[in-house]
Amino acid sequence: MQQNPGQRGSVDVHPATALLREILDLTGDFERHLGRELTVNPTDLEAMEELIRDGALSPTELAKRLGISTAAVTTVVDRLTAVGHVTREPNPADRRGVLVVPAPASVQRAMATLMPMILGMDSVLGGFDEEQQDTITEYLGRVAAVYRDQLPDDAEL
């Protein structure tokens, strides 16, 4: 049975809302693809994403960002170290601490998969005039706010 573009199951929604749902689904598919490219599981990929975005992090900070215990993050870091995606290095700000540092080759590998998608999105946006781009940006900002509003106050963002 063919659904109309704005229908999601038995709920009619605006076609743009249905497309956002499709983008979320495709994002999950893309993340699984990236995980396969890097040969990591979803939790390890999430850790890699944090490290790629923000650089070296302490295990405690990484655990906080992933919403897992420090014991669990040790296992994640052990797995990532074993496949060469990260190293543990002394923390210059805390002589007893360590930092989890992403391997440059792993960052390059991830970026080789990510950049075509990111640049493709920018190219699509470049096909709109400035006023349309502002409208799209405003719409997406409001959608992000709806998501934020649905999270409990103590949710990590």
Image: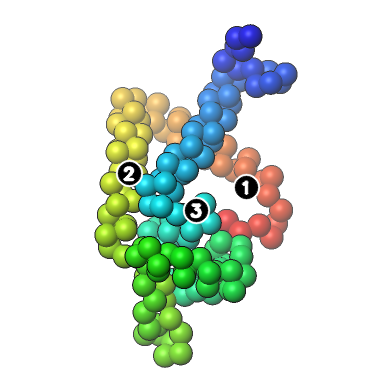
Residue 102 in the image: x percent, y percent?
A: 35, 65
Residue 100: image x %, image y %? 41, 72
In this figure, which residue is indicated by the disc labeled 1? 148
Residue occupying image coordinates x 44% and y 48%: 35
Lower sequence index among marks 3 and 1: 3
**What amino acid type is highlighted by mark number 1?**
Arg
Is residue 138 in view from this perspective? no
For residue 90, what is the image quadrant? bottom left
Labels in figure, total: 3
Q: Is residue 100 above or below residue 16?
A: below
Q: Foreground residue, 111 or 136?
A: 111
Can you tell which of label 1 and label 2 is closer to the viewer?
Answer: 2
Circle 3 residue: 41
Res. 113 mark: 2
Whole-Å distance between the Cαs marked 1 and 2? 28 Å
Where is the N terminus found, in terms of image quarters?
A: top right
